[in-house]
Image (tube, coloured by chain):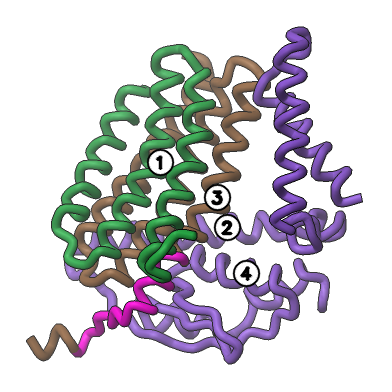
Chain colours: A green, B purple, C brown
Amino acid sequence: MYIAAIIALMVGAFLILIRALRGPTAYDRILAMNAMGTKTVILVALLGFASGRPDFLDLAIVYALVSFITTVAILKYIEAGRLD
Amino acid sequence: MRYLTFVLVLCGFYAVLSGQFHNSFLMAVGAGCIALIVFLGARMGIVDEESYPGPGVWLRALLYAPYLLWQVIISNIDVLKRVLSPSMPVSPRMVRVPYSTKTAFGTVTYANSITLTPGTVTVEVTDDGLLIHALTAEAADGLKDGSMEAQVKRLEGTK
Amino acid sequence: MEWTHTVTAVFLGLGCLFSLAGSVGLLRFPDFYSRLHAAGKTDSLAQMLILGGLLFVSPDWGVSARLAIIAVILFFTAPTATHAITKAARLDGLEPWTKEDANHE
């Protein structure tokens, strides 16, 4: 069950990767990577349950926060041209 | 009062994530982290009215949540239908919708809720309205009847 | 098979369906602004369904609390990130695609 869900998410992630590669604008790529971040969080949580080690959820929390900050940081850099 | 709530929330967060109270070293490090975060929060000036709107808002948010959840489900089914139909029935357009929410909290909630409802995404918030990107003309019209705005204003408590 | 596992399977299945729909939409929609609809909306429901489904099989309350924290974080950050991307694109002067553009080509 978990494995099936993981495979479905990986297929989705692969489709997103195609969009990230094709572009055509930088924002399409950022959007794709943002969606990828959400998928990764769910994937890590599912992996934890599949391997019987729910401790993985801590990693998922950290990844959720970091991926949001990454997206916002990239966008702030594009908007303002600097990060401070 | 706000600082007390802040510290209590952080203590709860620590207790949930660590789940143990017997290792005194880890307890001390946790207390140190809480103190550091409160200090940084105070220095950044983020412990204010905006981050702790008071207990009334939390209660009203509980009433607002089921409505928002239902909107999310409808909008997902809407996206699913559009994605699966081979002809791609979209005709995107930009519309400007006025808003009458009073507080920043209400406006942000309204804008984010619009993003989650069927066929519409908030692009920009300015003084004279929200710039909405709608997938179809019907989706744009659906916003203008103001049912969602009424819900948000009830959450805000200005109605 | 216990009933909790059945409930989890249904939730995971629905979540994966919406997640895949979002990915396909990201590929198929004609322009950046329409892709936002596919990506921004399906993510929030898909994560709620999958994490909510896992709640039924979580072994203790600590795991349940972590799942709830992840769901809440993602629920608040996903629309915010979507809006941030849109605003940056708008400031950069990206024009939305309309039906008329397609007819001209």
Answer left or right for B86 relative to B48.
left
Q: Which residue is mark 1?
A: C14
Range of magenta residues:
C84-100
Label 2 to label 4, Cα distance in Å? 19 Å
Labels 2 and 4: the sequence-earlier one? 2
Please tell me whether residue A81 is drawn above or below residue B127 in the rendered image.
above
- Callout 1 touching callout 3 (CB < 8 Å): no
Q: Nearer the viewer, mark 2 or mark 4?
A: 4
Image x and y of residue C20, in percent: 30, 46
Neighbor class of circle 1 (other Cα within 10 Å; few <14, some 14-19, many 20+) is some
Q: Residue at x 24, y 71 (%)?
A: C31
Out of B68 and B127, give the one closest to the viewer: B127
Give the residue drawn at x 77%, y 31%.
B12
The residue at the point 47 percent across, 14 percent down is A53
What is the three-letter code of the residue carrying label 1? Answer: Leu
Q: Amino acid at mark 2?
A: Trp
Residue assigned mark 2? B70
Tell if the residue under mark 1 belongs to the same chain as the one under mark 3.
yes
Identify the residue position indicated by label 4 in the image. Answer: B108
Alpha-carbon span between mark 1 and mark 4: 29 Å
Image disc number at residue C75: 3
Q: Chain under label 1?
A: C
* Within-10-Å neighbours for mark 2: few <14, some 14–19, many 20+: few
